[in-house]
Amino acid sequence: MARTRIILAAVTAVVYVAAVVGNSLLNLAGNASHVSIQISLNQPVMWLIALCGLLIAIGLLGRYAWAWWLGLAASAFQLYRLGSRVINQYSLSHLPGMHVVLLFSLLVIFLLLLISPKAMASCHR
């Protein structure tokens, strides 16, 4: 069960990276009718998110402890960044877009898969 959670967490990390990069490629952040993440391909933050996400996914598949800790810290930090942006810009006339909700839910799912004590114990290398 713990191994399955780790594999699902790694898949969730890859899907998160694909959603962030896909958002940049499709230029969904240009829509001014809702709150968006507004990350483009020429920003180093997007490449850092992609690199960390893929590194975490590869590390989790290898069941490394550093990947578990990095995944926990990175997802908590991204949840803070995304949540603070949405809270600061929230109003009923300016709701978050679907891609923001998708990224938020992927981060929450990733955290829920990681915080299990058995999942932590399975990442022992």
Image (tube, rainbow, N blue to C red):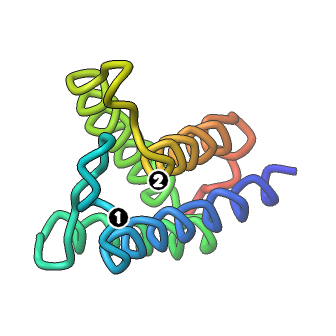
Q: Along the horizontal axis of the image, is 94 left or right of 41?
A: right
Where residue 15 appears, as percent x and y from the top left, is 56, 67
x 28%, y 51%: residue: 37
Q: Nearer the viewer, residue 107 or 56?
A: 107
Where residue 65 appears, as percent x and y from the top left, is 50, 56
x 31%, y 19%: residue: 91
Mark carried by residue 59: none
Where residue 5 appears, as percent x and y from the top left, is 75, 53
x 61%, y 60%: residue: 12
- Do residues under tags 2 and 1 come within 8 Å of each other at their CB atoms? yes
Name the quadrant containing residue 45.
bottom left
Where residue 17 appears, as percent x and y from the top left, is 44, 69
Q: What amino acid type is highlighted by mark number 1?
A: Leu
Name the quadrant containing residue 44.
bottom left
Q: Nearer the viewer, residue 12 or 56?
A: 12
Q: Residues within 10 Å of mark 1 (few under 14, many from 20)?
A: some
How many marks do you count on the picture? 2
User: Label 2 vs label 1: CA separation?
Assistant: 8 Å
Name the quadrant containing residue 43.
bottom left
* Vertical comparison of 111 with 60: above or below: above
Label 2: which residue? 99
Label 1: which residue? 28
Q: Nearer the viewer, residue 94 or 52?
A: 94
